[in-house]
Image (cartoon, helix red, strand yellow):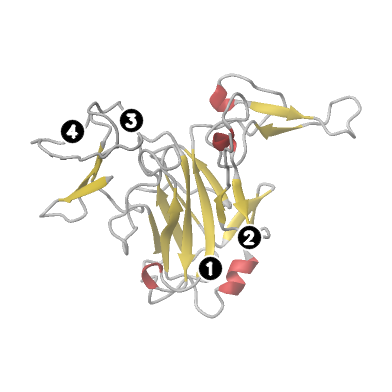
């Protein structure tokens, strides 16, 4: 259960309380069948309980504030918890070159991008823990997580973006989480309304293998990658590298439980991704 307390003088500042079902101790999550549970929850503190993992202090700043970390555009961004970055939605990187996203330009021909919003996100362990992208200011205001600005300083709602170099999308992931996934989307209406023109998967993870080199690396686990030699390379001199885990997975496919190895799913190759499905029938 979640309870949110709002600062009376600054409505964007909040304290988010999580109350887990279980025993009297914070670490006891045991719940017994055929048992009625009645909880009386009291909140009593004078300062911000920074050391209590059940409480999240929300003091949001716009994702665009102090965010000059311009990176190449991709359908999936691999970022660490707390990372901030920005990108041009109309250009993507391929083979070291910037290429115009002609399909997005086409879809923006009648309108253009007027707003961005967080489409969905996971918590740290699927449905437990903190949201990996953060807690939005409100249902209609996600600017502390994802924001969009025109490069010429004009209003994005009055002058929608429809081409390369016209705007930047800014994103900031929540700090101090163990990772997960989220999807941000661009809309042809104001405040995240109208049609979704494009979306981008944000993979929050401490996994960051070196993209250079063609040799297997096993340690540390956060940099683990595997050498892949095609059958056509008889002497093994031609090789590439692959990650040790699926895109968006919580863990590598090494001693991990199946649900933590799940990857993202896409419908007919569309950019919008969603979580894979896992069912344990044991």
For the C terminus, the image quarter is: top right
Outermost top residue: 219
For residue 169, what is the image quadrant?
bottom left
* In the foreground, 150 or 105: 105
Q: Please indicate, yes or no, whether residue 154 appears anywhere in the rendered image.
A: no
Closer to the camera in the image, 2 or 39: 39
Q: Report, in whole angstroms, how far the alpha carbon at label 1 lies from the one at label 2.
A: 11 Å
Of circles 1 and 3, which is in front? Answer: 3
Above or below: residue 182 compared with residue 191: above
Judging depth in this view, the residue of 243 and 120 nearest the camera is 120
The residue indicated by pointer 4 is: 49
Which residue is tagged 2? Answer: 270
Foreground label between 3 and 2: 3
Q: How busy is the neighbourhood of tag 4: few (under 14 within 10 Å), some, or many (20 plus)? A: few
Q: Residue at x 50, y 78 (%)?
A: 111
At 41% from the left and 51% from the top, the residue drawn is 171
| Residue 9 is at least partly visible in this image | yes
Q: Are marks 3 and 2 in contact (CB under 8 Å)?
A: no
> Disc 3 designates what residue?
29
State if disc 2 and disc 1 touch (CB < 8 Å).
no
Residue 234: horizontal and vertical position, in percent?
91, 28
Q: Which residue is mark 1?
A: 197
Secondary structure under tag 2 reads loop
Distance of label 1 from label 3 (alpha carbons)? 42 Å
| Percent coordinates x, y for residue 276 in the rendering | 58, 47
- Provide the secondary structure element on which disc 3 rests: loop
The relative height of residue 219 versus residue 174 in the rendered view (above or below) is above
**From this viewpoint, which residue is outermost toward the bottom?**
110
Instruction: Estimate how packed mark 3 is, as few (under 14), some (14 to 19) or many (20 or more) residues with alpha carbons within 10 Å.
Output: few
The alpha-carbon separation of the residues under discs 3 and 2 comes to: 40 Å
């Amino acid at each position: 259960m979640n309870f949110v307390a709002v600062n009376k003088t600054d409505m964007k500042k909040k304290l988010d309380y999580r109350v887990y079902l279980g025993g009297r101790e914070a670490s006891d999550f045991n719940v017994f069948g055929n048992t009625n549970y009645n909880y009386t929850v009291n909140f009593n503190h004078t300062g911000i309980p920074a050391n209590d993992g059940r409480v999240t202090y929300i003091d949001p700043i716009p994702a665009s504030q102090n965010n000059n970390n311009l990176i190449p555009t991709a359908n999936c961004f691999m970022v660490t918890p707390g990372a901030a970055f920005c990108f041009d939605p109309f250009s993507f990187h391929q083979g070291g070159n910037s290429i115009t996203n002609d399909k997005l330009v086409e879809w923006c021909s009648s309108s253009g991008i007027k707003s961005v919003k967080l489409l969905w996100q996971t918590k740290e362990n699927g449905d437990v823990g903190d949201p990996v992208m953060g807690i939005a200011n409100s249902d209609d205001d996600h600017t502390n997580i994802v924001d969009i600005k025109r490069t010429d300083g004009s209003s994005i709602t009055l002058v929608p973006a429809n081409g390369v170099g016209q705007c930047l999308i800014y994103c900031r992931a929540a700090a101090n989480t163990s990772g997960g996934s989220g999807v941000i989307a661009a809309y042809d209406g104001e405040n995240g309304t109208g049609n979704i023109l494009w979306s981008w998967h944000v993979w929050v993870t401490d996994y960051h293998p070196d993209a250079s080199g063609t040799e297997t690396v096993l340690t540390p686990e956060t940099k683990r990658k595997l050498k892949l030699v095609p059958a056509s390379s008889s002497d093994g001199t031609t090789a590439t590298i692959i990650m040790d885990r699926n895109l968006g997975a919580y863990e590598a496919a090494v001693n991990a439980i199946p649900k933590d190895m799940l990857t993202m799913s896409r419908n007919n190759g569309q950019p919008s991704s969603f979580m894979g499905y896992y069912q344990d029938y044991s």
